[in-house]
Image (cartoon, rainbow, N blue to C red):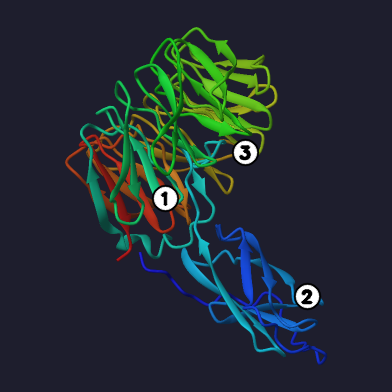
Amino acid sequence: MRPIRLLLPLLSVLLCVSTSATPARADDPQIVLSPSVGPPTSRFKISGTGFGSNETVFFYADGGLVGYAYTDDAGETKKKVYVPETTPPGYHSIDAVGQMSGLVAQSWFMVRADWVDFHFDSRNSGHNPYENVLRPLTVSGLVVDWTYPTGGAIESSPAVAGGAVYVGSDDGNVYALNAFTGALLWTYRTNDAVLSSPAVAGGVVYVGSRDGRIYALNASSGVLLWKYSTGGSVNSSPAVVDGVVYFGSADRRIYALNAISGTFLWRYETLGFVVSSPAVVDGVVYVGSDDGKVYALDTNSGLELWTYQAVGIVRPSPTVADGVVYVGSFGGNVYALDGSSGVLLWGYLTGGPVLSTAAVADGVVYIGSSDGYVYAFVANSGVLLWKWRLASAGPVVSSPAVAGGVAYATWDNGRVIALRASSGFPLWGYSTGNFWTSSPAVTNGILYLGSLGGSVYAFHLP
C-alpha cells in the first residue's frame, strides 16, 4: 500500500514571528515524533532540535499548517499535534520550518489502527471507532485484495497489529502475514489445531492450541518466548490486560498468567468446559462456561464476584460496555446483565442457539443467531431495532464487527455481508464455496477473514 497523503485540517494557527532569532546553528535540525504511529484522534509530540535560538517554528502536516512553537536558547522546541478523526491510514509528512533561520526538518507519522485481539479489544466490543475509510457510501466497492492458503480450516479470528495479520489454523500453525500484501512473515507450529484467536500486546502474540497449551510468541519473529500447559484444549481466545493473560481451558478452568514470564497467578474452576473468551474491564474478568453460567471474577485474586445462570451452555464471549455485560447462550437467549451485580437487565429470545459474541457500538448491540438472523438492539433497553436474514442462508455463528457505521457478519453458507448499522440494509456481499466461522477484523480500510476452506482473505477498496 503506497503512503496516503492528505492535508490535515488546521488545528489552531496564530501567525506570530519572532524578530530576535539568531543565525542558524551549524548542526542539521531534526524533529522526533513521540509516538510516531497512532490511530485517528490520537496526539503526538514533536520534539525539535538544531533550530535558531528564540525563533518561531511553524509545523506542517502534509503541507498544511497545524501550529507553531518557540525555540529556547539552545534552539530546541516542542509541540503537541492532534490527528483529526478523518485522517486516512498511511504515512503523513510532518515538517518544521524555522521562520528566521529558514532551517527545515521532516519526519513521518503513520496513521494506523490495530485490531489487537478477538473482537477488537479486552472488552470484546467488536467495534473499531477509528475506521474512516470503509463507510456506508464506500463499502460496496470492496474487492478481494489478497488471499493466503493455510494447510487447514480456519476457525480462529484474525488479529491485526503492527502491519501484520496473526491467525491460527486447524493445521496446528500460527501464521503471521503482511497485512497489506498477504506475504508470509513467519509460522509457528503447535501440536494440534489452533482454534483460539491470537491477542497481540507489547510485541508478543498470545494464542491457545487444542494441544492444551497457551503460547507466547515474539510478534516480529515467531520465536517462542514461553508456553504454559493446562489440562485440556485451549480454544478460548486470550485477553491481555495490565501485564496479565486471561483465558479458559477445556479442563474447566479460567487462568491468569504473568504476560511476560508465563508464571501462574491464579485459576478458577467452573463445572464445564471454558471455550468462551474473557472480557476484562475495570478489575473484573467476565467469562462464560459450558455449565451455563456467566462468571465475574476479581482480576487480582480470581475470587468469584457473582455468577448468572443462563439457559443452555455459554460459549459466546461476554461483551462489556458502559457497565453492562452482553452475552448469548445456546438456549437462544441474548442477555444484558449489570456488570457489578450480575442482575438481569433485559433478555431476548432468538429462534436458535446463540454462538455469536455481541458487538456494541454507539448504544446498539449487534449479535448473530443460529436462526440465520443478525439482530440489533437498543443497548440500554433491549428494544429490537432491526433484524436481517440472508435468504437460504445458514446460521450466523461468527461474531459481527462494526466499523464506520457498517456491521459485518458472516453466514454458514459462505457469505459475508456488510449491513448499514443503523437500519440493517445490505450494502455489499461476497461469497466463497467455504463456510465462515472466523469473525471479521475491520481496520485501516481493510476487512480480514479466515474461512473453513483454509484461506485468509483481505478485502479492500480498489
Give the distance between the C-alpha atoms of the residues marked 1 and 2, in whole angstroms. Answer: 46 Å
Q: Amino acid at mark 2?
A: Ala
Relative to 321, is 26 above or below? below
Q: Residue 97 occupies which quadrant of the picture?
A: bottom right
The residue type indicated by label 1 comes to Val
Examine the image and state in which quarter residue 55 appears. bottom right
Residue located 38% across and 31% down the image: 369
Distance between the Cα atoms at labels 1 and 3?
Answer: 25 Å
Q: Position of residue 33 (x, y in %)?
A: 61, 64
| Secondary element type, mark 2 | loop
Proximity of marks 1 and 3: CB atoms separated by less than 8 Å: no
- Amino acid of disc 3: Asn
Please name the residue shown 70% across and 26% down the image: 340
State the residue position of label 3.
Answer: 380
Q: Please give left or right for residue 310 compared with residue 155 in the image.
A: right
x, y percentage for residue 313?
A: 44, 16
Q: In the orientation shown, which residue stands out farthest toward the top? A: 271
Q: Which residue is mark 1?
A: 442
Residue located at (44% from left, 10% from top): 251
Label 1 vs label 3, nearer the camera: 1
Q: Earlier in the sequence, mark 3 or mark 2?
A: 2
When the figure is inspected, residue 227 is found, relative to residue 356, above or below; the finding is: above
Q: Which residue is mark 2?
A: 74
Q: Quadrant of the C terminus?
A: bottom left
Q: Mark 1 packing: few (<14 Cα in 10 Å), some, or many (20+)?
A: many
Q: Is residue 334 visible?
A: no
Residue at 41 percent across and 37 percent down: it is 399
Q: Is residue 241 left or right of residue 151?
A: right
Q: Earlier in the sequence, mark 1 or mark 2?
A: 2
